Amino acid sequence: DGGITQSPKYLFRKEGQNVTLSCEQNLNHDAMYWYRQDPGQGLRLIYYSQIVNDFQKGDIAEGYSVSREKKESFPLTVTSAQKNPTAFYLCASSKGTTRNEKLFFGSGTQLSVL
Amino acid sequence: AQSVAQPEDQVNVAEGNPLTVKCTYSVSGNPYLFWYVQYPNRGLQFLLKYITGDNLVKGSYGFEAEFNKSQTSFHLKKPSALVSDSALYFCAVRDPLMNRDDKIIFGKGTRLHILP
């Protein structure tokens, strides 16, 4: 959606396994975000990055890790420390970091535990 | 603390009737307010935003929203609903006085069903 590509669309994790969700954008946006969506709970922020090689924890960062080595890419790793990883994961970006900017979202990755 | 509430989990409207999806907020300063729509198994799409100025904001797909400062509300409206409007709608708020740039808060979402 809107120049943000998330893959895979569906992902299954085995017990004790780390898995990585991909997020790529071709919008030349500076800021990127990862949200977790659970039914009836809205969106919760996991991590965000305002510039390359820098990222900050959101509200629910425990059990997750990210990197921002390139402007276009912001992968999310769900580690074995995340005990309840089943959710719909959404990546988003915004042109800058001013507070009135809208977010552009990818189509999401549904992660399930085997 | 800033917050946003969508008091209705689900709203049912007959096709052709006007629709309203409610949103109230709480921030310390003047808010930045947003509406997003999510179709099944997809990401969110931006509909409209209020930053300053005219209280009635027009957005995509014929939607509009009215900012009411005294009632701290930002309800989403459309004069005539279409079946294709059926989706999950999220209200979001950002407090421009907050130092943390990540602090955009989303409501829990309201599922809109348009009945043919």
Image (cartoon, coloured by chain):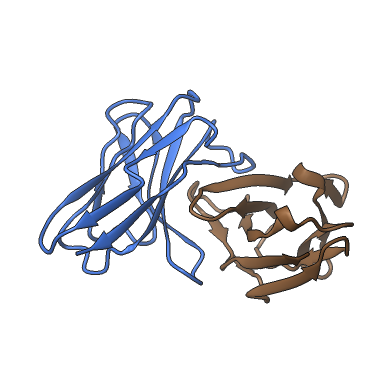
Depth check, front residue: B88 or A25: B88
Depth check, front residue: B100 or A23: A23
* Left or right of A17, for residue A62: right
Q: Where, by quadrant of the figure, is residue A70 drawn?
A: top left
The N terminus of chain B - image quarter: bottom right
Depth check, front residue: B68 or B40: B40
Residue furthest to the left: A16
Q: Residue placed at 46% from the left, 34% from the top?
A: A4
Q: Where, by quadrant of the figure, is residue B65 drawn?
A: bottom right
Residue B59 visible = no
Q: Residue placed at 75% from the left, 42% from the top?
A: B60
Residue furthest to the front: B116
Residue A88 visible = yes
The relative height of residue A98 versus residue B85 in the rendered view (above or below) is above
> What is chain B's hue in the picture?
brown
Q: Residue placed at 43% from the left, 38% from the top?
A: A32
Residue B38, image x, y percentages: 58, 53
Q: Residue placed at 50% from the left, 25% from the top?
A: A27
> What is chain A's hue in the picture?
blue
Residue B71, image x, y percentages: 81, 70
